[in-house]
Image (cartoon, rainbow, N blue to C red):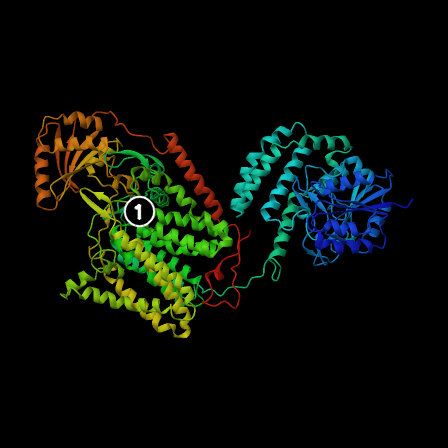
Amino acid sequence: MQPRVTAILVARNGAGYLERTLAALAGQTRRPDSTIFTDDGSTDGSDSILARADATVFVPAASARSFGSAVANALHVAAPSGETDNWLWLLAHDNAPAPDALAALLAAVEIAPSVAVAGPKLMRWLTSDVIESYGETITTFGASVSLVTGELDQAQHDRHNDMLAVAAGGMLVRESVWLALGGFDPALPSVDAALDFCVRVRLAGHRIVGVPDARVASAGGPERFDRPTISVRSTHALRRRAQLHRRLAYAPAAALPFHWLSLVPLAFARSIWHLIGKHPGLIAGEFASALAAAFSSAVLPSRRRLRKTRVLGWASIAKLRMPSRAVRELRANQRAIAAAPGSQTQQVAESTRPSFLSQGGAWVVLLAAAIGAISFSSLFGAPAVAGGALAPLSLTFSELWANVGFGWREVGAGFEGAADPFSFVLALLGTLTFWAPSQSVVVLYFLALPLAALGAWWCAARFAERGWSPAIAAVLWSLAPPFLASLGGGHLGAVIAHLLLPWVVLATVNAARSWAASAASALLFAATIAAAPSLAPALLIGWLAWMFARPKSIHRLIGIVIPAAAMFAPLVVQQALRGNWLALAADPGVPVGGSTTSGWQLALGSPVNGYSGWSNVAAALDLHDLAAPIIVAALLAPLAVLALLALFLPGSGRAVPSMVIAFLGFVTAVAAAHVHVSAVGESTVAIWPAAGLSLFWLGLIGAVVVTLEVLGRAVVLPALLVGATAVVLAGPLLAAPLVGDSDVRTSSGRTLPAFVSAEAAEDDMLGTLELTAQPSGALAAVIYRGEGTSLDSQSTLAATNTETTEAQRRLATLAGNLASKSGFDTAAEMQKLHIGFVLSPDATGEAATETRKRAGEALDGNPSLTAIGETSTGFLWRFAALDDSRPEVGPGPLGSPLGIIVTLTQGIVLIITLLLAVPTGSRRRARTPSSRPSEPASTFEEDDNV
């Protein structure tokens, strides 16, 4: 008997497709015996188009939830025939069949009575020679896989016809099988609905075939049936939700609880994988899908429906599943097709970036390394570096990491509070030489100049096509006066900020189109602000400006500040409770006093008085006082001229951001030099302005790069001139460590006398009370525990504290009674505070010397103290009656609930960002051959893989 075919056409807002689909349906060589047209609540006139068409039955306003529901509703209205040889041909509004499609489908099922479902080869709507979908299957773990998609149709897959599943569009299904199985699962409204139905058909004992000669045009997958467009995130969420539903519906009863319990843990695990794969936008869909599957009421009905119709075991479809190896091969082939030259997904041109090895980059770095090795040769072999604002790091790896987070800070009299974010940077730095953390700082001093040159070269190379520009940028950046002054003064935070700034710019520019670059920018942003908090306003302004310039990339750019916010949040809260907001800009490290630098000197690039060391040179040569500023101004003139010239040459638009950066840097430096937020003894300390000057210098160099790029062949003389003057300008600062005119010096790694260190080796809480005479005649008191202070134990909370705590008053009482004769029981108080030594450093000035003398006489006269004598750090007394009792101290970073919350939160944020930043594959840089230096920076961005 001739089979009877009922074509069911479902439309939802498909007016743009229906004319072609209806015409194709009417033009079939083997026309359907009857047609049912149904509109699913369209609002674009699709219902009117269907009503005018020549249909056997028209079902208006079905309001079904899905394509499958609309088909079921149409059958219900039209009343099924009940004949065993009746077939249903399922079409959506965007399924236009070729003239012989139905004939080919019927020919395939007529010769194979066991076949219950036949599927056509779906071709793309606009490119009819490209396969949209042909056959579906599932992996070992149940994920759906389209066997063929996006390939040019060359009949290479025509020999494959026995399939696990076919797509819904153009599917020819036996009516009796459809009714027996209950059609598509209502719990799968779009994705995997046809796959699930076909699996149940197979388990019911029927076959499914693909018919390559039957072609049907398709405008997209089932997820696009009720929407014109759909994002990658939404598609992934739909597929994952469908996969989890099928997993719960297919699982054996004994395994169902385990699958249910694994839903959320698997979401966490897959989220980590998405971070590594640079797909953070898929994470929300993972958890939404897991929760939806966990609390879905449709699982049990789906399981009952499957159990009712299944006659075969799962082993019957095992050979039709795709093994893991085949999945990997398929994915590799798809990536190769996508990456093929000229493909629709990868049409980029090779860049013409300067070569690091052949165009001067490597030579500049090597030259900087040689200069750095000579300049800091006095530090060679030193276990640690100290002096100025620099102190050794903690002696052990564990002590380094104990100073992060929120906990007890052993500074001054001791207190509980948040660590400076810079402590994370120091902990990471010290971990590089975990056997001797302070050696990492020594190594950094030797590598500082070549690292600065390297960062500047790569940053400039992103915006250059010629080798001169990055090379000169590397020279200028590595020999920048604020950088060299920070090295000489021991301002490690400013040094690290200077090294990181070019990488911050580079990563932030790329962050607009790359998740990896966005995460890298976030880490660099956090480290830079942690090292130099005074840069935060300028960098935040730059971040906001970049988001404004790239509004379509806000989803990638907005998260750049998250790690920095997590690191600073505890400190911000504590300073806010004090009402001391400006203290957030305080420099981390050892507070060091000094005179305020004038704006004129800052404009000449010098963060301290002395015009980058040229005042000493002029004095040695017996020159006039004005000689130093005149010499420095003359040496800076080529740099200034080239930077300003960039604003008047072709392509000046790219120089404007650089000059804005320079302006922000200079404003930051001037403000820092006049803001005093820290205190050391009785003196206030201004913020170190070198970090702002580094930003100022970075902007000027950016403008110079623009000028050098425009000059073309005339670049040689200006480039050599500005490079040579930069070398001469840096001469005094480079020579300072060699002639002993630098604050930094070698150190043993300990800040207390050797006698104290020997005792502290047995008692890490042993206290040493240091009484330092001040220029005014006052006395400053501080307690050091163990073997002394360290750079990572410093705290801006202590340095900026304006209120006297109970512990400080107690310490002041003890110090005052020790430094003068009184009836106070100092021995009992020293016992309570576990103080075993008293140290009196050398004094400078008449009043300070007199105070130290009187204090020494009082200490000599104290019967509980024994004079040890003069040491390298001052005169030492010992409290011999100290017992084994321990002082009361607060919890460490993991010793309190608040400390655990802070540490875990910061750690999780950093780990997530790090996973997102780790590169997982190569990406080609996109630049069109017509690129010119005058084009915006986006020309140099990388395409992301999502």
Query: Could you tell me which quadrant the N terminus lies in?
Result: top right
- Left or right of residue 636: residue 81: right
**Residue 282 horizontal/vertical position (percent):** 56, 44
Residue 209 or 447: which is nearer the viewer?
A: 209
Question: How many numbered discs?
Answer: 1
* Label 1 SS: helix
- Left or right of residue 588: residue 782: left
Q: Residue furthest right?
A: 1
Any part of residue 217 in sight: no
Tag 1: amino acid: Ala
Q: Residue furthest bottom?
A: 714
- Give the image quarter of residue 63: top right
Please determine whether, in this image, residue 257 is positioned above or below residue 582. above
Residue 474 or 672: which is nearer the viewer?
A: 672
- Residue drawn at (42%, 55%), measured in percent from left and top? 545
Mark 1: give few (<14), some (14-19) or many (20+) Cα within 10 Å: many
- Left or right of residue 712: residue 766: left
- Give the image quarter of residue 410: top left
**Residue 222 horizontal/vertical position (percent):** 69, 46
Q: Which residue is mark 1?
A: 585
Residue 711 or 579: which is nearer the viewer?
A: 579
- Give the image quarter of residue 797: top left
**Residue 619 horizontal/vertical position (percent):** 15, 62
- Residue drawn at (78%, 32%), measured in percent from left and top? 311
- Left or right of residue 394: residue 281: right
**Residue 19 horizontal/vertical position (percent):** 75, 55
Any part of residue 343 in sight: yes
- Residue drawn at (78%, 41%), measured in percent from left and top? 74
